[in-house]
C-alpha cells in the first residue's frame, strides 16, 4: 500500500519561496503519476501541478505557471514542488496525490492515494 507524506509548508512573505516534498513509502513512486493540489479556506480543491510516472511530462495550473516547478527524485522516492514568487493567493493546504497512470491529469478525482497535507501561508 502506498503512503504519501508531505512536508515543507510554512509561513513565508510575499515574493518568497518554499519547496514542498512528497515522500512515498510502501511502493516506488516510479509507477505513479503524482499531482499537487491545494485547498484554500472557503474554496474548492484545485489542481496545481502534476508529473507523469516517467517524469517526462508535467502540467501546471495557469495561476502558477512560471512560478512553480515540479520534479521527482527516483533515488529518494520523492516528488518536489518548488514554489517561487509566492503570493497571498497561494495560501492553502497543499496535498500530493498519486495514481498508477502514465499520463498526468490535474483532476483530483483521477487520484486514489493522498497525503495528509501541509499548510502554506503567504503573508507579510
Image (tube, grey):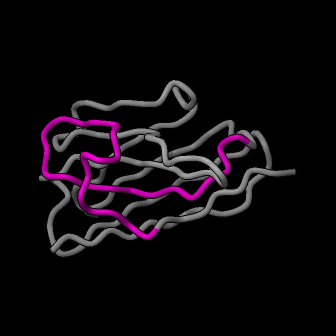
Q: Based on the picture, tell me whether residue 57 belongs to the magenta stretch.
A: no
Q: Which residues are magenta?
A: 89-116
- List x then y, in percent, for residue 70: 40, 41
> Is 85 above or below relative to 114?
above
Q: Based on the picture, tell me whether residue 107 belongs to the magenta stretch.
A: yes
Q: Is residue 88 left or right of residue 58?
A: right
Residue drawn at 27 percent across, 72 percent down:
3
> Hey, which quadrant is residue 64 in on the image?
top right
Residue drawn at 35 percent across, 54 percent down:
79
Q: Is residue 3 left or right of residue 1?
A: right
Q: Quadrant of the N terminus?
A: bottom left
> Is 70 above or below relative to 115?
above
**Nearest the camera: 8 or 99?**
99
- List x then y, in percent, for residue 84: 62, 39
> Is 23 above or below relative to 17?
below
Residue drawn at 33 percent across, 63 percent down:
114
**Nearest the camera: 66 or 63?**
63
Q: Residue furthest right?
A: 124
**Nearest the camera: 13 or 62?**
62
- List x then y, in percent, for residue 65: 52, 26
> Hey, which quadrant is residue 105 in on the image?
top left
- List x then y, in percent, for residue 109: 29, 47
Amino acid at each position: 500500500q502506498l503512503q504519501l507524506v508531505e512536508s515543507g509548508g510554512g509561513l513565508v512573505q510575499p515574493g518568497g519561496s518554499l519547496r514542498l516534498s512528497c515522500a512515498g513509502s510502501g511502493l516506488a513512486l516510479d509507477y505513479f503519476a503524482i499531482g499537487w493540489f491545494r485547498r484554500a479556506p472557503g474554496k474548492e480543491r484545485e489542481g496545481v501541478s502534476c508529473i507523469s510516472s516517467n517524469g517526462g511530462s508535467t502540467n501546471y495550473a495557469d495561476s502558477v505557471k512560471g512560478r512553480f516547478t515540479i520534479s521527482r527524485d527516483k533515488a529518494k522516492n520523492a516528488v518536489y514542488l518548488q514554489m517561487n514568487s509566492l503570493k497571498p493567493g497561494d495560501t492553502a493546504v497543499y496535498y500530493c496525490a498519486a495514481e498508477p497512470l502514465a499520463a498526468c491529469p490535474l483532476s483530483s478525482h483521477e487520484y486514489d492515494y493522498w497525503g495528509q497535507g501541509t499548510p502554506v501561508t503567504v503573508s507579510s
